[in-house]
Image (cartoon, helix red, strand yellow):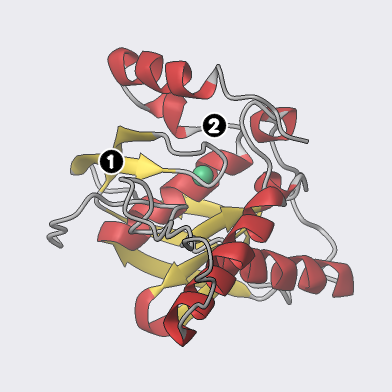
């Protein structure tokens, strides 16, 4: 049992939302940015570029079931690399292939000290009957955050990008992330997993959003 004093978020950066971000419009005549401001601006620009490549609700790809991966080839390795870069740049901690419009059973996620993992054909074995409800966000659902009930621990089995078998015993945040990402591969989103009241509220936030493409 791990204790998280802040809301757990799966796909999304820990500190996004809630205003806060540096939106310092330079005053007329003073356009000089400090090194820190430049770095923050560059990181934000990279986040936006990555975000623009991630499918947003109600994109149909997010609702489709991804297919088993059979060929562990160079193309798959390139996809893994692209997803890892996107996840990092978008400041996420997990990303499923369906979120980049690729219907293959693959996701990447951050695993504490072990770094970024990529798992093909993932399956959850022995999810704990003990569950916890906590708030989740999603890189495909803008600023929406809803409470979702998840098993507190599980075993994740699957294959690495070369096709070799992998197995992770996970708990807490990592267990939550992989349940969220596996849902993506089955066309499920956090708005499907939350209660009716939060779903309604989330859809209210998502619906009026104009499509900027
Ligand atoms: Zn997500």
Number of the front mark, 1 or 2: 1
Q: Secondary structure at mark 1?
A: strand
Q: Secondary structure at mark 2?
A: loop
Q: Nearer the viewer, residue 13 or 175?
A: 13
Q: Earlier in the sequence, mark 1 or mark 2?
A: 1
How far, Cα to Cα, is label 1 from label 2?
Answer: 16 Å
Q: Tell me which corner region of the image, top left, top right, bottom left or bottom right, holds residue 178.
A: bottom left
Residue at 65 percent across and 24 percent down: it is: 210
Image position, residue 114 (x, y; %): 43, 82
Residue at the far front in the pictured view: 29
Q: Nearer the viewer, residue 14 or 35?
A: 35
Image position, residue 172 (x, y; %): 25, 59
| Vertical comparison of 168 with 185: above or below | below
| Residue 41 seen | yes
Residue at 30 percent across and 45 percent down: it is: 18
Mark 2 vs ligand 1: CB under 8 Å? Answer: no
Mark 1 vs ligand 1: CB under 8 Å? Answer: no
- Circle 1 packing at 10 Å, graded few (<14), some (14-19), many (20+), is some
Which label number is shown at residue 135? 1
Which label number is shown at residue 116? none
Image position, residue 122 (x, y; %): 57, 55
Residue at 53 percent across and 47 percent down: it is: 139
Give the side of residue 24 with respect to residue 90, left or right: left
| Residue 118 seen | no
The quadrant in which the N terminus is found is bottom left
Residue of label 2: 188
> Cβ–Cβ below 8 Å for labels 1 and 2?
no
Residue at 50 percent across and 71 percent down: it is: 30
Q: Tell me which corner region of the image, top left, top right, bottom left or bottom right, holds residue 67.
A: top right
């Amino acid at each position: 049992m791990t204790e998280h004093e802040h809301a757990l978020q799966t796909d999304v950066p820990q500190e996004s939302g809630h205003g806060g971000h540096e939106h310092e419009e330079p005053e007329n005549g003073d356009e000089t940015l400090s090194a820190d401001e430049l770095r923050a601006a560059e990181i934000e620009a990279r986040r936006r570029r990555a975000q623009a490549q991630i499918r947003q609700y109600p994109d149909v790809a997010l609702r489709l079931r991804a297919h088993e991966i059979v060929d562990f080839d160079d193309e798959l390795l390139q996809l893994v690399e692209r997803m890892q870069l996107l996840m990092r740049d978008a400041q996420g901690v997990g990303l499923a292939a369906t979120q980049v419009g690729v219907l293959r059973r693959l996701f990447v996620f951050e695993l504490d000290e072990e770094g970024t993992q990529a798992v093909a054909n993932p399956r959850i074995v022995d999810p704990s009957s003990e569950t916890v409800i906590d708030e989740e966000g999603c890189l495909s659902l803008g600023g929406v955050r809803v409470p979702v009930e998840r098993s507190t621990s599980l075993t994740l089995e699957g294959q690495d990008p070369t096709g070799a078998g992998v197995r992770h015993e996970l708990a807490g945040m990592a267990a939550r992330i992989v349940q969220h990402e596996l849902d993506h591969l089955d066309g499920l989103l956090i708005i499907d997993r939350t209660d009716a009241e939060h779903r309604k509220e989330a859809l209210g936030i998502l619906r009026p959003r104009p499509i900027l493409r």
